[in-house]
Image (tube, grey):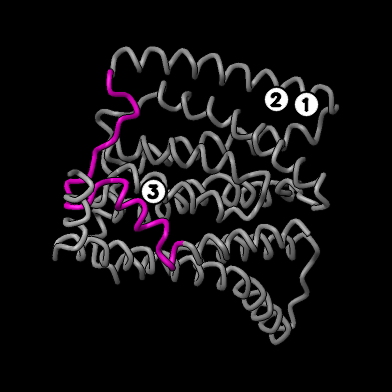
Amino acid sequence: MDRINSLSARYTPEGMWERRALKRNAASIFVAVLVWMFLRTILSGMILSGVRILLGMLRITVTPAHAALIYSATDVLTTLVSMGLPFFIMIKVIDIPLGKALPFHVIRTGFDVGSLFIALAASVIGVYTGSALASAAASGGMSPTPPAFDLPTDAPSAVFYILSIVIVPAFLEEMVFRGAILQPLRRFGDGLAIVASAAIFSLAHLNLYQIPNAFIMGLLMGYFVVRSGSLWAGVAIHLVNNGVAALFEFISSRIPTRLSYAMTLMLYIVYLLVGLTALIVSSRRQKRMFMVRAPQRVLTSPELSRCYFTSASTVALFIVLAAMTVYATL
């Protein structure tokens, strides 16, 4: 009987409207991500070419140090424009208020220091899962490589290092993935919104080392953003996670390898112990920990999820991102 009722609900005007609305949302995400990837590919070269032409016209000689700073500034600008522009347009196209798409509200409840350590502890699992996935890919003939960053050698380069590795990703990626992508999907259920945004977030890294960790962190950042009602929860997790990673990357380049491994291991142990403690305490205080709001819709949660993840736009997006990831490992 439930199956018959479900089928009949699917073909009611309300059910068909929900399916169309969800597919339109999936299509808008697909287009925005493709435009982002296209702009990221071409924009940096265009800006650098323009700068070279301008400097040539002005007969300005650039030192290697200044050239490195120009390249770093171009990288930051490229990230801001290529990622920010298409998703800002997407927000306008799907006609969701900017304040609802980017809820930077003051956190009053639903996120605290314990929540932060729960996410950081989960990142340890993600890091080792990513390493295992990359090793499996390497044994299959691929050549996955961890993300490489140009470490700073002076104060100006340190500023751009922090901007490009820590600050810009923490704010911009949260505005895109936990804002522009997750928030409009919430009307179809928080669970669907969190999982879909985490899946796109992970695949968009285009790196086998990062995909598992990005997916796990995406789930938790999405959950705490939904639970607290504010993007500041995701920004806080993102800032601390990337900031500590950037700091350890910088320190590791200046100390013996064994000491670097020992420091990283100690950090992970602290994350796991404090995070596990915080999880136990939070679970006792909050009996419905990690439970999310079900959609108040004609279609059920499984039907909405099936509609989104089997839509042509979503399937095509995942295929494109997976193909780009595989291509990067060859």
Residue 67: % across, % down: 74, 65
Location of mark 1 (residue): 260
Residue 190: % across, % down: 30, 43
Along the line of sight, the residue nearer the viewer: 106 or 1:
1
* Secondary element type, mark 2: helix
Tell me: residue 326, above or below residue 263. Answer: below
Work out which quarter of the rendered image holds the N terminus and state it.
Answer: top left
Along the line of sight, the residue nearer the viewer: 301 or 234:
301
Region of the chain picked out in magenta, as a range: 287-314
Residue 102 included in the magenta stretch of the image: no
Q: Residue at x 82, y 28 (%)?
A: 255
Along the line of sight, the residue nearer the viewer: 283 or 63:
283
Q: Count the marks.
A: 3
Location of mark 2 (residue): 264
Q: Residue at x 75, y 56 (%)?
A: 329
Disc 1, disc 2: CB below 8 Å?
Answer: yes
Spatial separation of the CA atoms under disc 3 and disc 1: 33 Å
* Amino acid type shown at disc 2: Thr
Q: Is residue 102 left or right of residue 47?
A: left
Location of mark 3 (residue): 178
Dot 3: within a 10 Å radius of its alpha carbon, few (fewer than 14), some, or many (20 or more) residues?
many
